[in-house]
Image (spheres, rainbow, N blue to C red):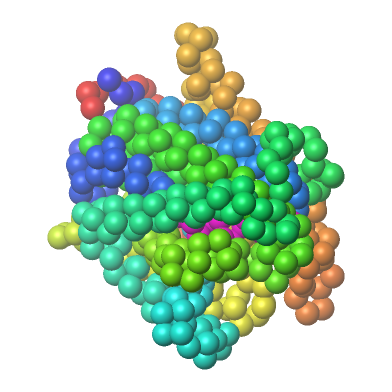
Amino acid sequence: MTQLDVRPRAGDTVSGVADGDVRGKGLGKGSVGLVGSAVIGISTVAPVYCLTSTLGSTAGEVGMQMPAIFLAGFLPMLLVAFAYRELNKAMPDCGTSFTWTVKAFGPRIGWMCGWGLVIATIIVLSNLAGVATSYFWLLAGEVTNNASIAALDDNKLVHIATCLTLIAVATAISYRGMTATKGVQYTLVGLQLVVLAIFVAMAFQKASAGTFDTGLDFSWSWMNPFAVESMAAFTAGLSLSIFMYWGWDACLATNEETTGSTKTPGRASLIAMVVLVGSYLATGIAAQMAVGSGGEGLGLANEETSGNVFAALAGPVMGPVLGILLFVAVLASAAASLQTTFIPVARTVLAMSTYEALPASYAKVHPRFKTPGRATVMAGVATGAFYTVMTLVSENVLTDTIFALGLMICFYYSLTAFACVWYFRGELRRSARDLFFKGVFPILGGVLLAAVFFKTLYDAWDPAYGSGSTLPGLDVGNVFVIGVGLLALGLVIMFVTERRSPAFFRGEVLTKSTPSLVVED
């Protein structure tokens, strides 16, 4: 049985659901099961892409405590996942964080929470496209044994053109619906997990043989997060770790298209989280044992290779033939995630439009594919524009946007966790289960992520934070400029939208509290 809020209003219904409550969107129901939902969650996170992008940066921040930081980042994500699960049981709406936060705190906070999710997704889509582009040319160079082909990635015009092409292809696949998405994902996710397992096994073998001078013997002290040298380093590492888990909530964004919409998405998200933490710990420990976490040679923190670790380790660890598989896995990981990451942003925009928080044109669902077609295309265009601008402005776009992404993630995840506690505040005394899963766990997760948000914001003011680069004329780090600038842009768009759609912002469309109706799932 599922609790849904309903406040009937005469003459105002959408898809059989009264105005003032969650509405049907016309998406394809029953398109995804438990396994498919979990695969979408894993694919959106893109474990191989995350590892090659942040393994070196994390080692550079926290040294040998990298495995401990992976665990530390997992904890708040797990706690917030419980909040998502409980909210989804009560309101299985594809708007997820946006819808739930509006119901708990009202339209303005909810709108900014939705904006945080949308802009975080745009940022990560641009990063995914960039990594996929780089590995496309690297792989082409390896296969043809032609260094000049691999060097095409260094040509900005070629890089941007390739990146925009990949974004267009991913947009087209996502546009065609969940069935097309699911079929592609089984292959791509399976491929990257198998290759990652081979890399881990071979890295352990190289470590036991002492192949590399920088290798280290395993120590349980690596699991101690309190051994990190400074709070600033800990926070920076934690922000990167949190980024590495981001995307599991795509399982929830498909709740209106999932069989057992009130329970299956929550279970799928927990399965995805377990797979991810296991993959990260195994890879981090194996790589650190094989090549060490220092800044010399193949060490993970070497500034020349830390932004793309697998490109440096593929050949030395796996050999020239199997090493190509790692290039394929990273490309597959980025390409798979590039496709599935359109799911949460398109469905959040669809929900915001359905509830009149964005222009009504984005509420249109394709009659054949049952997807938010216009919202998906909008996400693709915004991603391409963002990546093009950032690539032309900054040489360190990948590093700085990843750090800025950590800010956006902490922002909307923490708001969602707090929304869970506030929404269910009247139920916390009913049972021990309600107290912990609707109260204690979400509030702890929210507080932890809020603390990381504010500490990262403070540290990011320093020009040396992130890549250490700044925009011309500013003595402020790029990470701070990107993060705060995007939140400020959200406020501006919200105020403009409020003038065009006052009903939503007066609380007349999606209400904060309504009578409860029990319906069967």
Q: Residue furthest left?
A: 368
Q: Nearer the viewer, residue 156 or 254?
A: 156
- 16 sits to left or right of 204: left
Residue 272 horizontal/vertical position (percent): 42, 40
Q: Position of residue 151 (x, y in %)?
A: 54, 86
Q: Which residues are magenta?
A: 46-60
SS assignment for the magenta stretch, majority: helix
| 186 in relation to 428, above or below | below
Q: Quadrant of the C terminus?
A: top left
Counting from the top left corner in percent of width and height, residue 486 is at: 62, 62
Q: Indicate whether 286 appears above or below 139.
A: above
Q: Reply yes or no: does residue 297 show up in magenta.
A: no
58 is within the stretch colored magenta: yes
Q: Nearer the viewer, residue 144 or 153?
A: 144
Q: Quadrant of residue 481?
A: bottom right
The residue sitting at 65% across, 42% down in the picture is 67
Residue at the image point whose x is 67% and y is 77% from the top = 394
Instruction: Report the side of 148 relative to 266 (left or right).
Output: right
The single residue placed furthest to the front in the displayed view is 209
Q: Is residue 325 visible?
A: yes
Is residue 351 visible in the rendered image? The answer is: no
Where in the figure is residue 204, as x and y percent of width and height?
57, 48
Q: Quadrant of the N terminus?
A: top left
Q: Residue at x 48, y 8 (%)?
A: 431
Quarter residue 166 falls in? bottom left
Q: Is residue 474 left or right of residue 115?
A: right
